[in-house]
């Protein structure tokens, strides 16, 4: 009798543990999905730079978390340095239809019958720009910093796309439109060194701190 029970229970127990592991894996994937999704979008921008901005004068700094006196921290997806200006890039790896205007506080993402609100990325990047301006205030004039918002090609705008908002690699043409060398090589080097000095160490702890700061801002807002 015990032998028969063992023949039944052992396979069931083994299957049970596999089911638990699958559920754990699904839970982990859901928890980290926004993070991985964001990283895929950021990787796309890095690829665009390698493919279309081959001039060695272009220097791309990725995932820069900077101290912010008001908000604690601010996280910039990319900072593209060049003799033609500094481009502050916010990446949005969204699918579906996008609705939003330049002055609207919240934009909308629509996927089939579901709608989701998200912060106007132009406003979001404006805050990034202000923090970077403060960091570089003694080196570069604010007018040489430019905001760029990059959505992935899988998204489709159903309202007029505001200025400085692009889909796919179209943002590269905007950057290439700046031809006047306004930042000398030595000053460009100083800018890079200053940002590298101020940026917080890339780590899980830094990411968690930034997420906590975001939560506190939402709660207080």
Image (tube, rainbow, N blue to C red):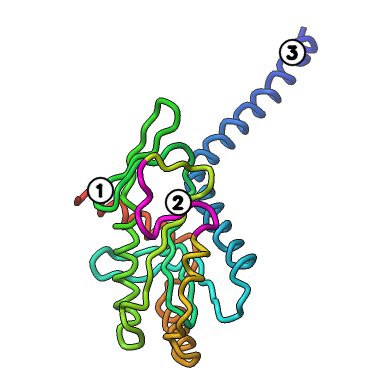
Q: CA distance from mark 3 to mark 2?
A: 51 Å
Proximity of marks 3 and 2: CB atoms separated by less than 8 Å: no
Badge 1 marks a residue whose secondary structure is loop
Q: Nearer the viewer, residue 178 or 49?
A: 178
Give the magenta-colored segment's residue range: 159-170
Left or right of 123 on screen, residue 52: right
**Where is mark 3, residue-wise?**
8
- Image x and y of residue 9, in percent: 71, 16
Up-down relation of residue 179 to residue 155 (above or below) = below
Badge 3 marks a residue whose secondary structure is helix
**Where is mark 1, residue-wise?**
104
- Image x and y of residue 17, in percent: 65, 28
- Image x and y of residue 109, in percent: 39, 39
Which residue shows up at 73% across the image and 20% down it?
10
**Where is mark 2, residue-wise?**
92
Q: On the image, which quarter does residue 13 sit in?
A: top right
- Image x and y of residue 145, in percent: 37, 74
């Amino acid at each position: 009798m015990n032998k028969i029970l063992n023949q039944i229970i052992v396979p069931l127990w083994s299957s049970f543990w596999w089911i638990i592991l699958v559920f754990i894996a699904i839970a982990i994937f859901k928890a980290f999905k926004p993070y991985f999704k964001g990283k895929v979008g950021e990787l796309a921008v890095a690829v665009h730079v390698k493919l279309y901005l081959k001039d060695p004068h272009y220097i791309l700094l990725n995932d820069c978390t900077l101290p912010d006196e008001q908000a604690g921290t601010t996280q910039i997806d990319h900072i593209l340095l060049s003799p033609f200006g500094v481009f502050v890039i916010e990446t949005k790896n969204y699918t579906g239809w996008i609705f939003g205007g330049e002055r609207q506080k919240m934009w909308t993402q629509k996927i089939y019958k579901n709608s989701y609100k998200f912060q106007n990325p132009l406003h979001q990047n404006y805050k990034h720009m202000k923090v970077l301006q403060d960091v570089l205030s003694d080196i570069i004039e604010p007018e040489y910093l430019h905001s760029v918002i990059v959505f992935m090609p899988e998204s489709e705008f159903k309202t007029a796309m505001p200025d400085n908002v692009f889909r796919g690699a179209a943002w590269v043409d905007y950057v290439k439109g700046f031809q006047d060398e306004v930042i000398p090589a030595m000053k460009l080097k100083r800018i890079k060194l200053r940002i590298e000095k101020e940026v917080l160490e890339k780590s899980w702890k830094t990411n968690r701190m930034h997420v906590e700061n975001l939560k506190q801002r939402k709660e207080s807002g």
